[in-house]
Amino acid sequence: MEKPLPGWDAHSKMINYIRPSAIDVEKVDPEARHGAVLALIYPVDNIPHVALMLRNTYEGTHSGQVSFPGGKREQIDKDLIQTALREAHEEMNIRPEEVTVVGPLSKVYIPPSRFLVAPFVGYSQKRPNFKRDPLEVAEIIEAPLHIILEESSIKQKPIFVQVTNSELEVKYFDILGHTVWGATAMMLKELAEILTE
């Protein structure tokens, strides 16, 4: 991951509505909240997988959505990498000492919650002993990595988009029957482009 990141070039392929880029937001919204997520790659029977989670249904912006483990930076976190590792441990029992952080992906801004999210790619030599936090996670999704590399996995359907307060035709990844769209889809698309370079 030493080459320049694809960034917005990759992100924009998964959105067809106006959405501010993270670079623009950093310039104009100093009050944006900071968070981080972990895109963990690990083997299952020698096949690379990536760990995702289905969030519980609740009264909130990201209810019932698929995402990477992650969340808000806390005062105890020395940096955003530590935020990603801590949250992944809390939400999915991914042990930080078993993760090698490979590097960052491009930041993504999430308008409804005003979060500027820093994704980090990690690798584990073995499958984590997953255990979901029942308060936050409805299901742990172990997705074979090849799914995000296949163009046939990218589909489109009407989805309610909070930033426009309307239903739009939105691009998404169909991952094991789950609809993965928005910020997570943007991150996955960038990861896919890096892996296929």
Image (cartoon, rainbow, N blue to C red):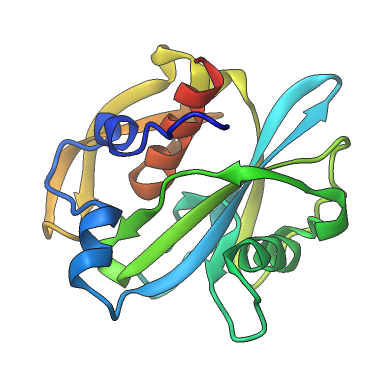
Q: Of residues 110 and 197, which is closer to you in this image?
A: 197
Residue 58 location (% of width, % of height) = 45, 71
Q: How many labels does the image show?
A: 0
Residue 170 vertical placement versus 86 (above, below):
above
Q: Who's the residue at 47% across and 14% down the image?
A: 150
Q: In which quarter of the image is the N terminus?
A: top right
Residue 177 location (% of width, % of height) = 50, 31
Q: Of residues 158 and 197, which is closer to you in this image?
A: 197
Residue 77 visible somewhere in the drawing: yes
Where residue 40 sits, quadrant-wise, is top right
Q: Who's the residue at 53% across and 62% down the image?
A: 36
Residue 62 visible somewhere in the drawing: no
Residue 155 location (% of width, % of height) = 32, 24
Q: Of residues 62 and 98, which is closer to you in this image?
A: 98
Residue 179 vertical placement versus 38 (above, below):
above
Where residue 162 sits, quadrant-wise, is bottom left
Residue 81 location (% of width, % of height) = 63, 61
Residue 116 shown left or right of residue 80 in the figure: left
Where residue 100 sits, quadrant-wise, is top right
Residue 189 shown left or right of residue 67 in the figure: left
Q: Who's the residue at 35% across and 38% down the image?
A: 7
Q: Who's the residue at 37% across and 48% down the image?
A: 183
Residue 88 vertical placement versus 49 (above, below):
below
